């Protein structure tokens, strides 16, 4: 198993980890922990006005963030999830300002990787920007990520070399998908 009990425990305790995702290595933390999210932004040097993608294990996890779907929305999502597509949804709830950073939107991805989804079932949704300081190239290995973050991150999971474009970021609209960032998957 790629993700040990120690990694799961560390994440549940609100600590940071670097893990291989379905695209690149990500520096991750519990999405529902404002303290963990603040620490991730600090360690990564992330622009405080820029929200991050949240990894989920199932479409139903959207309900935890107050996002409700129509039957048409659910059907459209089944055409891209699981996969390397991140979808932006409106989320005006002020409770999640620490995540949406004032944009009143959140982006989610349901990865196709079964081990990653098992991790998410054990931890809950994870905030998952790429494992690199703001403005630097993404780490392709756990060792590269460790050179960036050192002991500011408690767990590094080695999933081998990762060479991928980031996920495609899109938004579902009445007339179909609007691509906001072209990534690994074409829509």
Image (cartoon, rainbow, N blue to C red):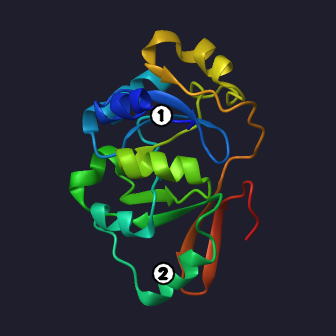
Quarter holding the C terminus is: bottom right
The residue located at (44%, 69%) in the rendering is: 59
Image coords of residue 145 (percent x, y)? 61, 21
Reading the image, the residue beneath label 1 is: 47
- Please indicate whether residue 186 sits to the left or right of residue 158 in the image: right
Residue 134 appears in the picture as rendered: yes
Image coords of residue 97 (percent x, y)? 29, 49
Compared to 70, does 113 lie above or below? above
Q: Residues within 10 Å of mark 1 (few under 14, many from 20)?
A: few
Q: Nearer the viewer, residue 44 or 22?
A: 22
The residue located at (49%, 88%) in the rendering is: 72
Reading the image, the residue beneath label 2 is: 74
Q: Which mark is residue 125?
A: none
The CA span between labels 1 and 2 is 32 Å
Residue at disc 1, secondary structure: loop
Residue at disc 2, secondary structure: helix
Q: Earlier in the sequence, mark 1 or mark 2?
A: 1
Numbered-mark total? 2
Image coords of residue 184 (percent x, y)? 75, 54
- Please indicate whether residue 97 sits to the left or right of residue 176 in the image: left
Q: Residues within 10 Å of mark 2 (few under 14, many from 20)?
A: some
Image coords of residue 155 (percent x, y)? 47, 22
Q: Nearer the viewer, residue 64 or 1?
A: 1
């Amino acid at each position: 198993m790629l993700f040990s009990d120690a990694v799961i425990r560390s994440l549940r305790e609100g600590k940071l980890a670097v893990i291989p995702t379905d695209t690149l290595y990500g520096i991750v933390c519990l999405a529902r922990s404002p303290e963990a999210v603040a620490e991730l932004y600090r360690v990564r040097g992330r622009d405080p006005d820029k929200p991050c993608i949240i990894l989920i294990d199932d479409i139903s996890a959207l309900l935890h963030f107050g996002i409700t779907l129509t039957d048409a929305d659910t059907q459209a999502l089944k055409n891209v999830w699981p996969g390397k597509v991140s979808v932006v949804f409106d989320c005006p709830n002020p409770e999640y300002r620490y995540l949406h950073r004032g944009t009143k939107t959140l982006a989610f991805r349901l990865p196709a990787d079964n081990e990653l989804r098992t991790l998410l079932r054990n931890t809950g949704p994870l905030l998952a920007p790429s494992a690199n300081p703001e403005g630097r190239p993404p780490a392709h290995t756990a060792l590269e990520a460790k050179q960036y973050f050192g002991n500011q991150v408690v767990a590094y999971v080695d999933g081998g070399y990762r060479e991928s474009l980031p996920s495609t970021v899109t938004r579902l609209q009445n007339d179909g998908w609007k691509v906001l960032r072209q990534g690994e998957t074409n829509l």
